[in-house]
Image (spheres, rainbow, N blue to C red):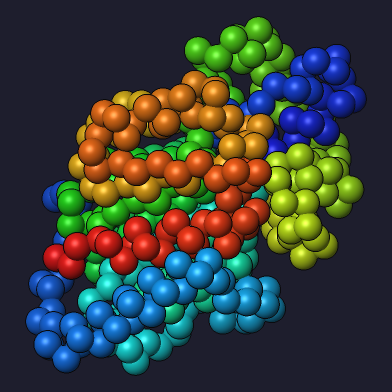
Amino acid sequence: MAVNLAFFQSFSSSIAPRQIQQIPSCNLGNLLRFPPPRAIPISAVARASAAEAEAAVTAEKGESLAALEVSEIVGKCKKWAWRGYAINYFVYPEISSEAAADVKPPLLLVHGFGASIAHWRRNIPTLAQSHTVYTIDLIGFGASDKPAGFQYTMETWAQLILDFLNEVVQRPTVLLGNSVGSLACVIAAAESSKSFVRALVLFNCAGGMNNKAIVDDWRIKLFLPLLWLIDFLLKQRGIASYLFDRARQRENLRNVLLSVYGNKENVDDELVEIIRRPALDEGALDAFVSIITGPPGPSPVQLMPKISLPVLLLWGDQDSFTPIDGPVGKYFSSLPEQLPSVSLFMLEGVGHCPHDDRPDLVHKKLLPWLASLPVP
């Protein structure tokens, strides 16, 4: 989700004129080695083809399986030690007995700002019909560690993703990300060799870790002094604590989510709690301040030309945070004409988080695209 998701609207509603509240938030090899590929039995390929056909039928019908219960996700999450920190992750199904899992690339789902593994609860069962699905809480979010004094950067999250692929997944993987999670996936793909990442799926990709990345948007230029003021205020502990408390109140979160989602029915109590609960953890305030006041990180404009992998862009046309007519949206919408490996689908009536906003529309485009990826 967008970096200034709840905070910017809560903050601006109390200190800024109304027109400021309308600014969209435009966010936000040699390194690793995989083990040698395993031989794939012919029978496994045949079963994989059957699974692929079944997934294609499901996609054609626009069907999605029921969402996982959040309690099930929480109860079956695992911990991975990364640089001395505990990183929360989830794999589904836990043990795959299908030969298709040996043929199809695994998927790694990477959430956006303020979200966590459970934000993919509506997608995991459907995607797991033909792929092993991994999801991860980036450091600073969800149930992963939120260490005091940690300096959060886009590059750190990208390295975490690459290390997770190498140490946990241990197979070339399709990366799927939303918002800043998308950008972390882009950085990881640009920094890895082709064997680390099989393909990319980006849901409303962010332009940076925070608003300061979008300096060529007149709306950001106009209110850049306000953003600097916000940075200054957030570095005052008492002020930051007060503003963060406002931002994580249920009603404030619900109002912001309603403005972010096109499908208002999916903004329910469960979603509010998915966003709110990790914000109550010790270290959540430090993570929040570090992310908003830190460097925006590499621009996707610089990174995308380095990537020759297949890329699927799924963009909600009602996104007010990274609008398709903003600098980031315009850049990504131009890519299919520049790079033959890039495909773009606009999702009508969908907001900043397409995968949770309208999972049926997402799966209808995503499943056939995944099935079309060539077997290495």
Q: Is residue 237 left or right of residue 376?
A: right
In the image shown, does 312 or 232 lie closer to the viewer?
312
Residue 250's spot in the image, x, y percent? 86, 52
* Residue 54: quarter of image: bottom left
Q: Is residue 267 left or right of residue 118?
A: right
In which quadrant will I find the C terminus? bottom left
Residue 74 appears in the rendering: no
* Residue 94: quarter of image: bottom left
In the image shown, does 16 or 43 lie closer to the viewer?
43
* Residue 13: quarter of image: top right
Residue 57's spot in the image, x, y percent? 42, 74
Q: Is residue 100 left or right of residue 252?
A: left
Residue ID at (50%, 70%): 61
Residue ID at (65%, 7%): 222
Q: Is residue 259 left or right of residue 367?
A: right
Residue 151's spot in the image, x, y percent? 51, 39
Is residue 179 positioned above or below 101 on the image?
above
In the image shown, does 112 or 81 lie closer to the viewer?
112
Residue 164's spot in the image, x, y percent? 36, 62
Is residue 215 positioned above or below 297 on the image?
above
State how many labels appear. 0
Residue ID at (29%, 84%): 50
In the image shown, does 155 or 267 lie closer to the viewer?
267
Residue ID at (56%, 81%): 76
Is residue 220 positioned above or below 347 on the image?
above
In which quadrant will I find the N terminus? top right
Residue 331 appears in the rendering: yes
